[in-house]
Amino acid sequence: MRHRKHSNQLGVKKEHRDALLANLSTALITRGRIQTTLKKAKALRPFVEKVITLAKKGTLHSRRMAIARVRDTDAVHLLFDEKAEQFAERNGGYTRIYKLGTRRGDAAEMALIELIDADDQGYEKKPKSKAKKSAKKAAKKAAKKVAAKPEADEAEAKAEDVDTKAEDASEEPENKKAESAE
């Protein structure tokens, strides 16, 4: 059975696809980021991440397997000697894909694929806790109280305005009586 064995075939034969991914991975390893079509970037991501995982192992066997896949010894040496140290503390997720829009000539979706830096801030996952959920509920309740409070304040202000108007109205006749007496 071939369950869950799907890979992006890119409309070419296996040999062509292997060569294409080898060339793209060489460019990605040496340059750090490349611009290509979205389909190719999505096909390249698992290919490169498996090669980087081999580089993290650092054994002779994994180096030979990486050379067999990437087909460029200089790129593999760069990956194993320099870049593997960047990803030593990382458990997967070595690449990032940005969508760039469509290409003008054939309207193909373009993408930018890059290797993520070791000090990337987007990597750290914060553990989800129940306290965070209860804090959100408390914030919603507080927001409702704040929203209800101005309405109550407005009602009190109107009541005070009515009281002050009533006091002003009661004082006016006394002032008129005092003026007429003089």
Image (spheres, grey):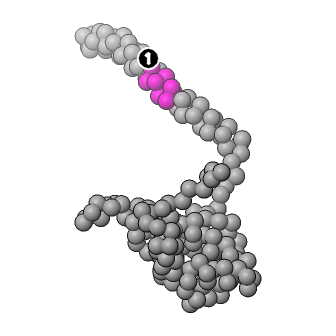
Quarter where residue 68 is shown: bottom right
Residue 22, percent from left and from top: 52, 77
Secondary structure category for the residue under label 1: helix
Q: Main secondary structure of the magenta part?
A: helix
Residue that mark 1 sits on: 159
Q: Is residue 175 visible?
A: yes
Q: Is residue 160 magenta?
A: no
Counting from the top left corner in percent of width and height, residue 85 is at: 67, 80
Query: Does the magenta portion include 153?
Result: yes
Horizontal arrangement in the rendering, residue 39 relative to residue 68 (left or right): left
Q: Residue at x 55, y 29 (%)?
A: 145
Q: Is residue 28 above or below residue 146?
A: below
Q: Is 171 left or right of 85, judged from the image as shown?
A: left
- Residue at point 62%, 74% (across, down): 51
Q: Is residue 130 above or below residue 108?
A: above
When the figure is inspected, residue 44 is found, relative to residue 83, above or below; the finding is: above
Q: Is residue 83 visible?
A: no
Name which residue lies at 51% across and 81% down.
26
